[in-house]
Amino acid sequence: MPSLTVVRLLTLVVCLPFLGAAARADTCDDLARQIAGAIGGKVGKRAGPSIDIRLAGPIKFDVTCRAEPIVQATSAEPAPSATFFRDLSVASEILIGESASAVEPIIANAYRTSLSERRKSFIQQNGWSASCYTDPGSSTMRTLCSVGRIPPG
């Protein structure tokens, strides 16, 4: 019969992956709450690693936590409003630590590049990235932009 120490050690080894996932979930929940509060939204449903942030109007946000968290905004407007870029920049400041005033023109540039080149635009900065995808023909999602840290490695 195994000793009590061995049983405890085996229990810890089995539970350790779940503790890491729970800690990541708590961190993601905290990020979603901070972002929602900063942009005037409310935390919505969680689906796997993603948490919706509800806002009034045509803009939708979510925070996805995997290796590094990502904040994503979508807009059904023909052209995203100034609020779209401002709110995504504010959310990005919380997520990556760069000032919203530094992030906003980079997101806007990624959006313009996506429109002009008709493809996803991806801009890397000092350990983080911004990307935008546009689909002017869609009636539900015309713009999708995201910001997040680049995973190490």
Image: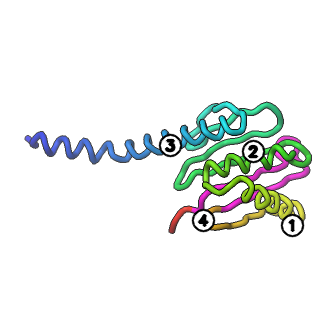
Q: Position of residue 74 (x, y in %)?
A: 77, 45
Q: Decide if residue 101 is on the left or right side of residue 24.
A: right
Closer to us: mark 1 or mark 2? 2
Q: CA distance from mark 3 to mark 4?
A: 20 Å
Q: Earlier in the sequence, mark 2 or mark 4?
A: 2
> Element under label 3?
helix
As drawn, 73 above or below 104: above
Residue for badge 2: 87
Q: CA distance from mark 2 to mark 4?
A: 21 Å
Q: CA distance from mark 1 to mark 2?
A: 25 Å
Q: Label 4 is placed on what type of residue?
A: Gly
Q: Decide if residue 85 is on the left or right side of residue 18.
A: right
Residue numbers of the magenta segment: 129-150
Going 55% across and 55% down the picture, which residue do you hit? Answer: 68
Q: CA distance from mark 4 to mark 1?
A: 25 Å
Residue for badge 3: 27
Q: Earlier in the sequence, mark 3 or mark 2?
A: 3
Q: Position of residue 66 (x, y in %)?
A: 54, 51
Mark 1, other Cα within 10 Å: few <14 / some 14–19 / many ≥20:
few
Closer to us: mark 4 or mark 1? 4
As drawn, 68 above or below 54: below
Going 84% across and 64% down the picture, which residue do you hit? Answer: 113
Residue for badge 1: 117
Q: CA distance from mark 1 to mark 3?
A: 36 Å
> Element under label 2?
helix
> Element under label 1?
helix
